[in-house]
Image (cartoon, grey):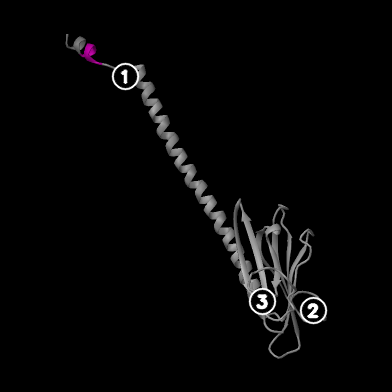
Amino acid sequence: MNMKKLKKDQRGITLIELVIAIALTGVITAAITMSIFQVFNMNTRTSNHMAAVSHVQQAGKLVREDIMKAQNVDTGDDPGTPELELLTLTWKEGGTEIPHEVIYTLEDMSSGEFKILWRYYYINPDINPDPVSTTKVAEYIDPDQTSCCCDCDGDGDGDCDGDCNCDDAVVIFRVTANVGGQSETRVYEVMPRAG
């Protein structure tokens, strides 16, 4: 009799309770999955933006240092060419007559959409036509948003309105990097060394 009573009082879970438990488990799993996805997505965007910032800062640092040494500045060609000579800088070091030249070019990346900013450094380029050093300055450069020009009218408005061979010329270097859809733009205004 004891066994009969025990069986009679035992209850299992109903089908409705099982369905509710499965539904709640599904909702909790979906919420956790979405949270993890958002964290990874945010990390990727942040990482891409930081890479774009790093590229424009590196480009600005090297170009600014070279412009401050330069006695002669020649800015850019037509941006539609595959290899774009963006900037040519020349100077003579500390009392010597040996010319130094730096050429910045934008060259295609394998993806084709963006470009690599290269720096070619020459010492006495008329005698030694090979660069002393070649440096990959930055990648993922947007050629449509990157330019170099001079403000010569002295009004300080940042407009490109002349060549760089005037007194008090300011070279305006604008560079944009785009990594994984995350873009960063910087504008550098630098006065070259007096010629």
Q: Position of residue 146 (x, y in %)?
A: 68, 62
Q: Name the disc covering residue 146, or none.
A: none
Residue ID for mark 3: 154
Q: CA distance from mark 2 to mark 3?
A: 32 Å
| Residue type marked 1 | Ile
Residue ID for mark 1: 13
Q: What segment carries the magenta color?
A: 6-10
Q: CA distance from mark 3 to mark 1?
A: 85 Å
Q: Name the disc covering residue 125, or none.
A: 2
Using a 10 Å C-alpha cutoff, classify the residue at mark 2 as few (fewer than 14 neighbours), some (14 to 19) or many (20 or more): some
Q: Residue 8 colored magenta?
A: yes
Q: Which one is in front, 39 or 191?
A: 191
Pointer 2 and pointer 3: residues touching (CB < 8 Å)? no
The dominant secondary structure in magenta is: helix
Give the position of the N terminus as an image quadrant.
top left
Q: Secondary structure at mark 3?
A: loop
At horizontal 36% and vertical 18% (from top left) the residue drawn is: 16
Q: Position of residue 19 (x, y in %)?
A: 39, 21
Q: Secondary structure at mark 1?
A: loop
Q: Which one is in front, 135 or 82?
A: 82
Q: Quadrant of residue 141?
A: bottom right
